[in-house]
Amino acid sequence: MTTTQRYPHPDVGKITTAGAARSAHLSALRAPRSLPSPIAVTR
């Protein structure tokens, strides 16, 4: 019993927040990156 007492007891809110942050991070990695706008050269 004393061995298992040292394990953390996760909070559902913290798990949900961490999952949302991970999903947002992975979505940003998969999102197509926009190309830089062309530079207009005027003389």
Image: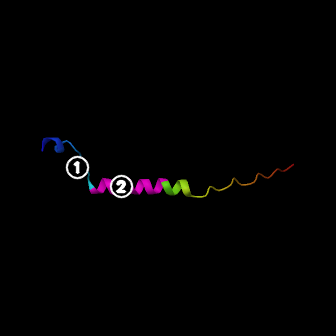
Rate crowding at label 2 as few (under 14), some (14 to 19) or many (20 or more) other CA atoms within 10 Å.
few
The residue most toward the right is 43
Q: Which residues are magenta?
A: 12-25
Vertical comparison of 2 with 24: above or below: above
In the rendered image, which residue does mark 2 sit on?
A: 17
Left or right side of 25 for 36 = right
Q: Closer to the camera, 43 or 40?
A: 40
User: What residue is drawn where x is 28% and y is 57%?
Assistant: 12
- On screen, residue 35 versus residue 42, left or right, reads left
- What type is the residue that disc 1 sits on? His
> Quick one: which residue is furthest to the left in this view?
1
Q: Residue at x 22, y 44 (%)?
A: 7
Mark positioned earlier in the residue sequence (1 or 2): 1
Give the percent coordinates (x, y) of residue 42. 84, 51
Which residue is identified by label 1?
9
The kind of residue on which mark 2 rests is: Thr
Give the image's coloring scheme: rainbow
SS at mark 1 in the image: loop
